Image (tube, rainbow, N blue to C red):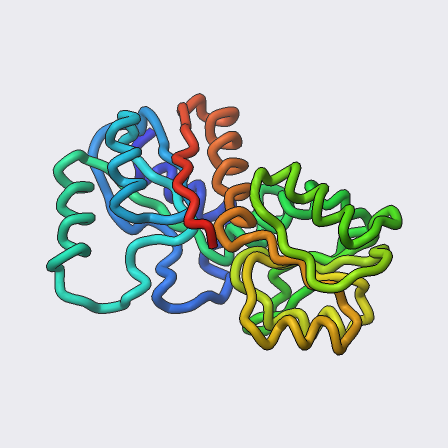
Amino acid sequence: MDILQISHYLDDLLDIKDIKDSPNAMNGLQVQNTGDIKKIGLAVDLCMATIEKAVAAECNMMFVHHGMLWGGVQPIRGNFYEKLSTMMRDNLGLYSAHLPLDMHPVLGNNKALAGLSGLSEIEPFGEYEGQKIGFKGRLEPISATALGAKLEAGMGSTVKVIGSGEVKTLGLVSGGAADILRQASAEGLDAYLTGEGANHHFHEAVENDCVLILAGHYATETGGVKAVGKHLQEKFGIESEFLDYPTGM
């Protein structure tokens, strides 16, 4: 399969055309290449480091969550030129999926977080641009501290827990979605899980008696790319490799 065939498949699989996102997310095929796809590099972020990892791993396509066009229209120079010229020189194609990857009910980042949390009775949650991008559900009663430790063990990253008490209901949205804490509080959920937050979210969590769990922007968004890579490998026999480059954020 070439990159156009894989891209058409992913467009349908991830419902690219019907999910609202930032215009600069540019979901879908971002950089074309030639020839059959032999190996796909999976990464959270498209950056020079992951490009170099992909080239070293002999990938000829990358599938990422954060693509290369967030800056919108821009001159092809400096770091942008270095990334693009390296990819074109090494025949490295690029497909990016932002919110469509967060939201996917089977392969998405939030589905992976729900699995790690032990969430049951799962329902859509967390409205953004008129669509619910995360999940909420029930847990076997667990202390906030123990839930944080469980997530740390499952994700292999540092988890910060703001608040305390027993958690029986949980909402979650991966990445930098701490503002959705307000929706979790309004719905009376015991806790809300996301990647990162700002100073004021500490006070919102405490004052609204809703435990806030910050598990890292990067760490909460590794599950989706891994799941898509596994899916493509099982369906089409295309090898994939996760290119880990944690930001610590």
Residue 213 relative to residue 20: left or right: right
Q: Would you place residue 235 above or below residue 185 in this image?
A: above
The picture places residue 75, in percent across and down from the top left corner, at: 13, 65
Residue 135 relative to residue 238: left or right: right
Q: Residue at x 69, y 41 (%)?
A: 116
The picture places residue 168, in percent across and down from the top left corner, at: 85, 55
Quarter of the figure with residue 36: top left
32 and 184: which is toward the camera: 184
Residue 148 relative to residue 190: left or right: left
Q: Residue at x 83, y 56 (%)?
A: 167
Q: Residue at x 50, y 61 (%)?
A: 18
Quarter of the figure that contains the N terminus: top left
185 and 94: which is toward the camera: 185
Q: Residue at x 24, y 31 (%)?
A: 55
235 and 219: which is toward the camera: 219
The picture places residue 81, in percent across and down from the top left corner, at: 14, 53
For residue 112, say whether it is visible. Answer: yes
